[in-house]
Amino acid sequence: MRMSKRARLTALSAATAVVAAAGVWALVATTGRDASATLAQNTAAPSSTQPPSSASTGSSAPTTTTTVSSAAPTTTTAPTTRNTPGTVVAPKPVTPAPMPAPTAHAVAVPVPPAPHPAPVPGCAPSYSGTNASHSEVNSALLAAGAQQYWSGASNPPLVAVDPPPPADGSSSTAPPPATPTLGPPAKVTVPAALIQAIAWQESGWQSAIVACDGGVGTMQVMAPTASWMNQRFGTPYDFKTLAGNAAIGAEYLEWLIAYFGENYFGYHYDITNSDLLTAVIAAYNAGPSAVTFAGGHTVETAYSANVKSLMSKQPWG
């Protein structure tokens, strides 16, 4: 029994296209003796897609086809969200650690031999050769003091500066202070007034004098001290010459500045600091082990007081 035209149109209207999340579903509706539906699932993108063929119904009514593209579904990717850096906390400013007050403590560093043994009673100084002029002595002292012998000293550690606490009394969220690290290499030399004053105190700038305790020349260098300094700094200075004597005296002073600065003053080598200056002067006369500290200061000695006075008065003109 043939369907009426009205029935065929009703069957045709029932054909629909449905798109599922897993793929593209094509619903093809055709007219014929019986209205039939073919349901196909596309789960992969085919290389080519042919439209459905028209089925002859024996009727002049045209075949109507609903076609849904079988191309692979486009996957829409959500925009990539980049991690936005958080607020960068500015690093704390760094500054050299402050110079600490010196305190007495053991230091495991080899030190030169004590410079001056007890003098022989009744002995008078002697001379080996002729004294150089004061002008020559001064030139030798200035040249020696300006020479940098100790090249391994470092400046004070650089430490982070703690910011003031918040005004509202809340706890600070700033990062902790940086781990202290040593600063850049330091340049250690001997100030002119210091080496001049010590030479005046030791010998009155007499380059040929030989003291009863064995001290020689302008800086009253002892033979064991000369050997120790030459070995320490890899130098060949002859302490019996004016230039060599001044150089070894300057080496010793630089060694003392670095020794006390590093071990007692937190890597500070500011010889204008009264306590460091006192330690260096006193040690030149009696050795590093003889220097004492009390109440956060270096204990002044008669020798260090005399040299400081000479640094101020400068009687050598």
Image (cartoon, rainbow, N blue to C red):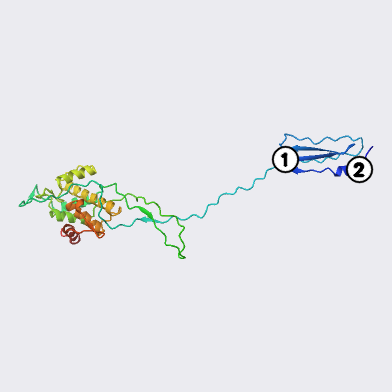
Which amino acid does the dot numbered 2 rest on?
A: Ala
Mark 1 is surrounded, within 10 Å at the Cα level, by few (under 14), some (14 to 19) or many (20 or more) other residues, namely some
Q: Which mark is residue 238?
A: none
Q: In this view, does 62 lie to the left or right of 187?
A: right
Position of residue 92 measured from the top left corner of the image (x, y, whole percent):
42, 56
Q: Which mark is residue 7?
A: 2
Position of the N terminus by quadrant: top right
Q: How far apart are marks 2 and 1 (CA)?
A: 32 Å
Position of residue 108 measured from the top left corner of the image (x, y, whole percent):
25, 47
Using the rendered image of the protein, determine whether residue 317 is visible from the camera's viewpoint: no
Q: Regarding mark 1 in the picture, which secondary structure is present there? A: strand
Q: Earlier in the sequence, mark 2 or mark 1?
A: 2
Q: Is residue 311 left or right of residue 160?
A: left
Mark 2 is surrounded, within 10 Å at the Cα level, by few (under 14), some (14 to 19) or many (20 or more) other residues, namely few
Find disc 1 in the rendering and name its residue: 23
Which amino acid does the dot numbered 1 rest on?
A: Gly
Farthest residue, direction bottom: 168
Q: Regarding mark 2 in the picture, which secondary structure is present there? A: helix
Using the rendered image of the protein, determine whether residue 255 is visible from the camera's viewpoint: yes
Position of residue 214 measured from the top left corner of the image (x, y, whole percent):
11, 48
The image quadrant that residue 299 belongs to is bottom left
Camera-nearest residue between 48 and 190: 48
Q: Exactly how many numbered labels are in the figure?
A: 2
Position of the C terminus by quadrant: bottom left
